[in-house]
């Protein structure tokens, strides 16, 4: 019974994310707000990774910085960095680069909070 309920929720989320008349951020807000789900619940339903599961290393070019890169199965990727020389402190804010951000004028998302990072992670994995 619970499995049927989760499948219905998963199908409804997919329907929302595939709507062509909304940009990806509107789709995300629709799932989180209208369906009253948390990012953790969405991640659990789809087995997505979120911030807490990222494995950061010392940045290869800045020893006071951190870095993490993930390639997803759907050919999307994300690179997350933070530290004194970056657009994020590496603790509560981060600089995000992904195949989504490359299409923007800035090329990155600067000073992204953990919530914003989780949002971006979900959008890249859907």
Image (cartoon, rainbow, N blue to C red):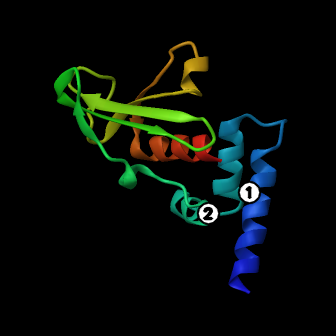
Nearer the observer, 6 or 57: 57
Q: Going 56% across and 61% down the picture, which residue do you hit?
A: 47
Q: Is residue 119 above or below residue 97?
A: below
Q: Is residue 22 left or right of residue 87?
A: right
Cα–Cα span, label 1 and label 2: 10 Å
- As drawn, the label of residue 54 is none
* Residue 50: image location, x then y, percent: 46, 52
The kind of secondary structure element at disc 1 is helix
* Residue 46: image location, x then y, percent: 61, 60
Q: Is residue 34 above or below residue 18?
A: below
Going by the picture, which residue comes out furthest to the bottom? 1
Q: Going 76% across and 53% down the picture, which residue do you hit?
A: 14
Q: Going 29% across and 31% down the picture, which residue do you hit?
A: 82
Q: Going 71% across and 58% down the picture, which residue do you hit?
A: 34
* Residue 90: image location, x then y, percent: 27, 36
Q: Residues within 10 Å of mark 1 (few under 14, many from 20)?
A: many
Q: Is residue 75 left or right of residue 113?
A: right
Nearer the observer, 74 or 53: 74
Q: Is residue 38 left or right of residue 27?
A: left
Quadrant of the rendered structure where residue 93 is?
top left
The kind of secondary structure element at disc 2 is loop
> The N terminus is located in which quarter?
bottom right
Front: mark 1 or 2: 1
Q: Is residue 2 above or below residue 11?
A: below
Asked if the residue at tag 2 contacts the one at tag 1, i.e. Cβ–Cβ closer than 8 Å, the answer is: yes
Q: Circle 2 sits on which residue?
A: 37
Quadrant of the rendered structure where residue 88 is?
top left
Going by the picture, which residue comes out furthest to the left? 63
Q: Circle 1 sits on which residue?
A: 13
Q: Is residue 38 left or right of residue 92?
A: right
Q: Earlier in the sequence, mark 1 or mark 2?
A: 1
Nearer the observer, 12 or 69: 69
């Amino acid at each position: 019974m619970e499995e049927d309920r989760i499948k219905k929720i998963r199908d409804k989320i997919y329907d929302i994310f595939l709507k062509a008349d909304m940009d990806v951020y509107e789709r995300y807000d629709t799932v989180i707000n209208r369906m009253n789900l948390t990012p953790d619940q969405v991640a659990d339903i789809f087995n997505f990774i979120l911030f807490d599961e990222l494995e950061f290393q010392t940045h290869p070019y800045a020893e006071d910085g951190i870095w993490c890169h993930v390639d997803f199965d759907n050919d999307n990727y994300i690179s997350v960095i933070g530290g004194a020389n970056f657009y994020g402190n590496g603790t509560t804010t981060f600089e995000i680069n992904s195949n989504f951000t490359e299409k923007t004028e800035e090329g990155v998302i600067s000073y992204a909070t953990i919530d914003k990072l989780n949002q971006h992670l979900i959008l890249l994995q859907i």
